[in-house]
Image (cartoon, grey):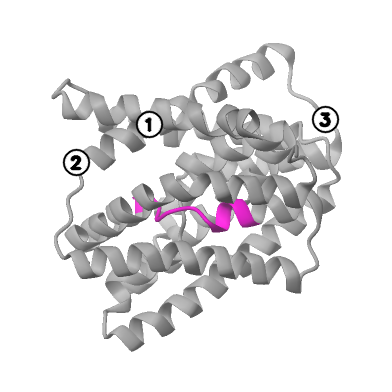
């Protein structure tokens, strides 16, 4: 079991650790360029490639989309209640309590744990997160959804093309398929590098908020994913992938949104930092549980 978990988690920690150490050493990195490359080129190609070659019926992918939507909306309701009771502004902290890091961490973990099929289903969770992050979050923080930004987000179009290919059984020309595959292959390592680099730059401003909401995000996300999977009757790989993504720490994009709209970005950075560092210790248990649910955890 230790060997299996190490094979899943150690690559994630090493690559993110390289990014963290790179930043701490003061070495240059054009994070803006790398992030744009990951978001606008590599990740759309990764999702297109993984979804189009999912090897599962289209109905299973659409079920994952619906399950992810239910998970995020339920998490938002739970987060709203918690924040109201704590007297904290929803505008600042609802996104950071709602959205786990389905991209930088969720995608690689699903791939290492469950292979191509796990990656394809996790891409569905990530797609729902992206859509909500550019509709629900801006509507709350800026008073209107960022539909223009969403409409120019390549992940949406990569996903749409992937679903079309999956539904029709069509394939890309060999030259294009190989190009998409090669570009998609750089998404996971670059995403982990930029995650580590970003964490090195974050600071905790108010410890009570960072710790309370950081731990709250992990507990809420896992609990909601578990509940949604039970209510919807998910089984096997779909259940494991949803719960794995539900237990992710706060997404870095929540900090970027808070910074853009002036919603306590320093505090949100602390939530991202605390939840991610805490998750590093909890991930072995989360991954082991997801593997056990799917029936692939060795004894």
Q: Position of residue 259 (x, y in %)?
A: 22, 56
Find the distance from the CA under tag 1 to the CA under tag 3.
Answer: 36 Å
Is residue 295 visible in this depiction of the protein? Answer: yes
Question: Would you name the residue on which mark 1 appears?
Answer: 16
Q: Position of residue 263 (x, y in %)?
A: 22, 67
* Quadrant into which the N terminus falls: top right
The reply to whether the magenta stretch includes residue 251 is yes
Q: Position of residue 260 (x, y in %)?
A: 23, 56
Q: Provide the residue span drawn in magenta.
A: 243-253
Closer to the camera, 131 or 54?
A: 54
Q: Residues within 10 Å of mark 2 (few under 14, many from 20)?
A: few
Closer to the camera, 93 or 2?
A: 2
On residue 209, which mark appears?
none
In the picture, measured across the screen, residue 108 lies left or right of residue 294, that is: left
Find the distance from the CA under tag 2 to the CA under tag 3.
Answer: 44 Å
User: In the rendered image of this protein, does residue 234 appear above or below residue 227?
Assistant: above
Closer to the camera, 245 or 173?
A: 245
Is residue 135 visible in this depiction of the protein? Answer: no
Residue ID at (62%, 32%): 112
In the picture, measured across the screen, residue 95 lies left or right of residue 52, that is: left
Question: Would you name the residue on which mark 2 appears?
Answer: 201
Question: Would you name the residue on which mark 3 appears?
Answer: 170
The reply to whether the magenta stretch includes residue 215 is no
Residue ID at (30%, 84%): 86
In the picture, measured across the screen, residue 103 lies left or right of residue 160, that is: left
Helix, strand or loop at mark 1: helix
Is label 1 in contact with label 2 (beta carbons under 8 Å)?
A: no
């Amino acid at each position: 079991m230790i060997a299996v978990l190490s094979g899943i988690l150690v690559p994630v920690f090493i690559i993110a650790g390289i990014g963290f150490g790179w930043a701490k050493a003061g070495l240059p990195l054009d994070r803006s360029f790398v992030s744009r490359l990951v978001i606008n080129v590599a990740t759309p190609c990764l999702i297109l490639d993984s979804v189009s070659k999912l090897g599962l019926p289209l109905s299973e992918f659409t079920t994952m989309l619906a399950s992810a939507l239910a998970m995020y909306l339920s998490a938002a309701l739970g987060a709203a209640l918690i924040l109201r009771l704590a007297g904290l502004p929803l505008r600042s902290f609802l996104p950071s309590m709602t959205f786990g890091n389905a991209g930088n961490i969720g995608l690689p973990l699903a791939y290492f744990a469950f292979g191509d099929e796990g990656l394809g289903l996790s891409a569905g969770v990530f797609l729902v997160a992206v859509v909500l992050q550019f509709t629900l979050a801006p509507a709350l923080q800026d008073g209107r959804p960022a539909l223009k930004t969403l409409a120019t987000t390549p992940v949406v179009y990569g996903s749409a093309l992937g679903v079309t290919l999956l539904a029709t059984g069509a394939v890309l020309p060999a030259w294009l398929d190989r190009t998409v595959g090669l570009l998609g292959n750089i998404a996971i390592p670059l995403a982990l590098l930029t995650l580590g680099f970003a964490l090195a730059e974050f600071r905790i401003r108010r410890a009570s908020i960072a710790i309370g909401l950081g731990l709250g995000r992990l507990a809420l996300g896992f609990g909601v994913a578990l509940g949604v999977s039970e209510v919807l009757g998910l089984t096997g790989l779909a259940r494991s992938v949803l719960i794995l993504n539900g237990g992710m720490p706060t997404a870095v994009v929540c900090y970027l949104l808070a910074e853009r709209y002036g919603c306590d970005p320093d505090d949100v950075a602390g939530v991202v930092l605390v939840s991610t560092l805490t998750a590093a210790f909890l991930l072995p248990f989360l991954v082991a549980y997801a593997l056990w649910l799917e029936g692939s955890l060795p004894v």
